[in-house]
């Protein structure tokens, strides 16, 4: 019975993290972009919010001091912390490109993922999916 409880708790935790990530992503979407289909031939680079803004996800248990030390080492500055999903929004302030900073972050065992901060488009009509 305990195994079922732990499995259920793990599933609930994953769903909570996923829903929180979606909510955070939606809060970053410009209202004018909601429901607007991507233009034909649209360049995905245009969807990047800022060339040097990254979202860095950390493994559970990574402390704030360790995260800050890694940001300092790479040359980035914390913009916003998303505690519930253990992720940070940062801007790269060093001479590294975003791609170089992503590689450096992903080399660290405390990092689950690092990616550019991008706009997302959410269809308002289910037929647009």
Image (cartoon, rainbow, N blue to C red):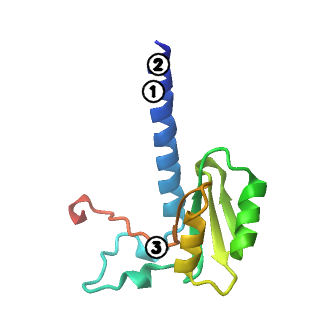
Q: Residues within 10 Å of mark 2 (few under 14, many from 20)?
A: few
Q: Residues within 10 Å of mark 3 (few under 14, many from 20)?
A: some
7 displayed left or right of 73 = left
**Of residues 43 and 60, which is closer to you in this image?**
60
- Considering the numbered disc 3 on the image, is that residue within a helix, a strand or a loop? loop
Q: Circle 3 sits on which residue? A: 119
- Considering the numbered disc 1 on the image, is that residue within a helix, a strand or a loop? helix
Residues at circles 2 and 1 in contact by the CB criterion of under 8 Å: yes
Residue shown at the point (35%, 85%) measured from the top left = 43
The vertical placement of 36 against 15, above or below, is below
Q: CA distance from mark 2 to mark 1?
A: 6 Å
* Residue 70, x across and y down, in percent: 71, 65
**Of residues 88 and 21, which is closer to you in this image?**
88
Residues at circles 1 and 3 in contact by the CB criterion of under 8 Å: no
Q: CA distance from mark 1 to mark 3?
A: 33 Å
Residue shown at the point (55%, 72%) measured from the top left = 102
Judged by depth in the image, the label closer to the viewer, 1 or 3, is 1
90 displayed left or right of 13 = right
* Residue 117, x across and y down, in percent: 52, 72
The vertical placement of 18 against 25, above or below, is above
User: Looking at the image, which residue sits at the far left?
Assistant: 127
Residue shown at the point (54%, 68%) measured from the top left = 28
- Earlier sequence position, callout 2 versus callout 3: 2
User: Looking at the image, which residue sits at the far right?
Assistant: 65
> Residue 7 has which mark?
1
**Residue 27 position by quadrant:** bottom right
């Amino acid at each position: 019975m305990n195994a079922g409880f732990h499995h259920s708790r793990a599933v609930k935790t994953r769903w909570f993290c996923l829903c929180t990530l979606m909510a955070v992503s939606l809060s970053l979407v410009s209202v004018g972009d909601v429901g607007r289909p991507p233009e034909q031939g649209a360049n995905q680079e245009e969807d990047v919010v800022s060339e040097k803004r990254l979202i860095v996800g950390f493994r559970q248990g990574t402390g704030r001091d360790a995260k800050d030390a890694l940001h300092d080492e790479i040359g980035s500055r914390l913009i916003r912390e998303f505690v519930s999903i253990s992720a940070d929004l940062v801007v790269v302030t060093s001479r590294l490109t975003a791609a170089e900073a992503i590689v450096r972050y992903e080399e660290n065992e405390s990092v689950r993922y690092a990616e550019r901060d991008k706009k997302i488009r959410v269809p308002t009509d289910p037929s647009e999916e």
